[in-house]
């Protein structure tokens, strides 16, 4: 039995259903921008559940491998089935637990686009979504900003917006609280569409420039939250591969093996050597022979650069958890168990080391590098919508499953990264992985020389900022 409020919403939706697509066509600029960003968040080849699907236009725009839509309005569902026979549509109340149990299977993505405002019990509805989730499922909430309430009511009075009943006006903080109460973990937040109209061709320019600025973007019409279920986050007992890229690091090879704790039952150590001139390859072979009780392997690069070494190593690693330990040992090998436990405990899905929290040893990082790292961390935190205090810390950890998703979707970015860090960071952002930073005490080198050139690599970092802006922000 529907409540009077819900029955009124259904009656209005049934009445407006024949005109729904017409309203969308009259506001193409607004909807295309919204769908474009959702396509970025969802990706390709996914199974998608659209809750409050209307006439199915969002599923059409996303083109998922499997699309299921649910709506309270029978007329909306009838039109959706007629226009989009490739998807499955259900008439039902998403606040009814019995109905939700009739939806079969799990989904990669569950979308509530302009849905949360019409729910009577947001908390219970969100809690009920866990049964449709796996560890990798992402919940996407898209909704109007509360600041736009008077503007939207005015446009509705002027006949410029489809009529709607009174809705809940929830802030981003309100929804974060509801997700937290229902055991969902917020992965990403974004604010878009400062200008929802074309404005003589200036609308898109405004949205891709002024509308993305810190502070200003909070005034945008549309807010987005991406979350994951915490019910399936833990993954105890996973095997691990520690990848150690090395070039001219002969004096650190044995120390890396000796100092690395045996933090899981099945641990692989994988050296990737890159055309060293100091006998590093011979030293690796000697160490492998000297420690026959350990699973130590080695490969040689046919390419160049750390990025190539990481890709080559991860492609051959057999562990369920993939970890990077730089051979200069400025990140202490003794800290690797912390990274492993942060991942398998479910705290994060992409664990990034940061050298800029604890005090570091004298000369461990030159002053100019230190200042530049802080500036770049601010830029990348804004670009990625996740806090990054140190993008260039070499130690990064993720599951092999999530790395394979990044690798599969690499065409979106291309082979752009000589460092190896940004291929993983940008990929983690694109896959909506939960990023956590783990502070380490950065040590000075005891052997060899740094492979980093301050000015040449500094220019490359500037290029990375521009690249990230185009690929991750100005979508």
Image: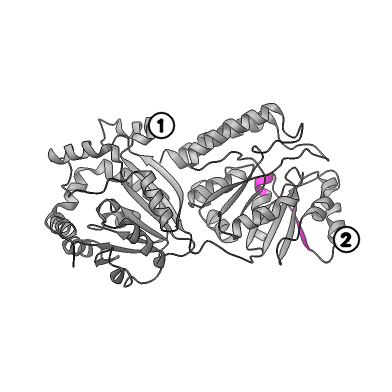
Alpha carbon separation for disc pair 2 and 1: 58 Å
Image quarter for residue 319? bottom right
Callout 1: helix, strand or loop? Answer: loop
Does the segment drawn in magenta span residue 305?
A: yes
User: Which residue corresponds to the image point at 62% horizontal and 29% vertical from the top-left?
Assistant: 372
Looking at the picture, how far across and down is residue 125, in whole percent? 33, 61
The magenta segment:
295-308
Looking at the picture, how far across and down is residue 173, in whole percent? 39, 44
The mark found on residue 290 in the picture is 2
Does the segment drawn in magenta span residue 460?
A: no
Pick the quarter of the image with the C terminus.
top left
Looking at the picture, how far across and down is residue 23, in whole percent? 18, 47
Return the residue nearer the eye: 207 or 176: 176
In the image, is residue 131 above or below residue 166? below
User: Which residue corresponds to the image point at 36% horizontal and 59% vertical from the top-left?
Assistant: 126
Asked whether residue 304 is in view, the answer is yes
Callout 2: helix, strand or loop? Answer: helix
Mark 2 neighbour density, 10 Å: few (under 14) some (14–19) many (20 or more)? few
Q: Nearer the viewer, mark 2 or mark 1?
A: 1
Mark 1 neighbour density, 10 Å: few (under 14) some (14–19) many (20 or more)? few
Return the residue nearer the eye: 175 or 208: 175
Looking at the picture, how far across and down is residue 473, in whole percent? 44, 39
The mark found on residue 432 in the picture is none
Asked whether residue 273 is in view, the answer is no
Which residue is the site of mark 1? 215
In the image, is residue 404 above or below residue 456? below
Return the residue nearer the eye: 449 or 156: 156
In the image, is residue 472 above or below residue 336? above
């Amino acid at each position: 039995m529907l409540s009077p409020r819900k029955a009124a919403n259904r009656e209005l939706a049934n009445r407006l259903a024949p005109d729904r697509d017409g309203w969308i066509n009259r506001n193409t600029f607004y909807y295309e921008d919204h769908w474009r960003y959702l396509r970025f968040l969802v990706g390709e080849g996914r199974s998608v559940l659209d809750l409050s699907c209307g006439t199915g236009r969002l599923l059409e725009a996303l083109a998922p491998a499997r699309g299921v839509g649910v709506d309270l309005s029978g007329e909306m569902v009838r039109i959706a089935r007629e226009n989009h026979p490739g998807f499955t549509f259900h008439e039902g109340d998403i606040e009814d637990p019995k109905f939700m149990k009739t939806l079969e299977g799990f989904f990669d993505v569950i979308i509530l686009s302009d849905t949360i405002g019409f729910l009577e019990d947001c908390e219970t509805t969100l809690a009920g979504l866990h049964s449709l989730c796996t560890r990798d499922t992402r919940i996407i909430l898209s909704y109007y900003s509360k600041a736009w309430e008077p503007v939207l009511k005015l446009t509705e009075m002027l006949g410029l917006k489809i009529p709607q009943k009174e809705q809940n006006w929830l802030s981003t903080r309100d929804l974060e609280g509801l997700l937290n109460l229902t055991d969902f973990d917020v992965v990403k937040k974004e604010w878009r569409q400062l200008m929802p109209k074309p404005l003589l061709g200036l609308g898109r320019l405004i949205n891709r420039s002024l509308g993305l600025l810190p502070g200003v973007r909070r005034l945008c019409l549309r807010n987005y939250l991406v979350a994951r279920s915490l019910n399936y986050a833990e993954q105890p007992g996973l095997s691990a591969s520690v990848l150690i890229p090395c070039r001219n690091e002969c004096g650190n090879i044995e120390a890396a093996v000796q100092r690395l704790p045996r933090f899981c039952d099945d641990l692989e150590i994988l050296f990737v050597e890159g055309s060293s001139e100091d006998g590093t390859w011979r030293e690796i072979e000697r160490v492998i022979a000297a420690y026959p009780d350990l699973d130590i392997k080695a490969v040689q690069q046919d390419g160049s650069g750390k990025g190539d070494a990481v890709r080559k190593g991860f492609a051959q690693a057999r562990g369920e958890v993939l970890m990077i330990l730089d051979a200069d040992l400025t990140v202490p090998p003794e800290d690797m168990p912390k990274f492993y436990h942060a991942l398998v405990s479910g705290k994060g899905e992409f664990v990034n080391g940061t050298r800029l929290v604890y005090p570091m040893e004298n000369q461990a990082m030159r002053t100019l590098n230190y200042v530049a790292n802080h500036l770049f961390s601010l830029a990348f935190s804004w670009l990625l919508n996740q806090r990054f205090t140190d993008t260039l810390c070499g130690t990064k950890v993720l599951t092999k499953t999530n790395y394979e998703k990044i690798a599969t979707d690499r065409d979106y970015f291309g082979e752009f990264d000589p460092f190896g860090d940004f291929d993983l960071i940008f990929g983690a952002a694109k896959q909506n992985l939960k990023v956590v930073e783990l502070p380490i005490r950065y040590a000075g080198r005891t052997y060899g020389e740094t492979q980093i050139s301050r000015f040449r690599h500094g220019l490359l970092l500037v290029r990375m900022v521009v690249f990230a802006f185009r690929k991750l922000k100005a979508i």
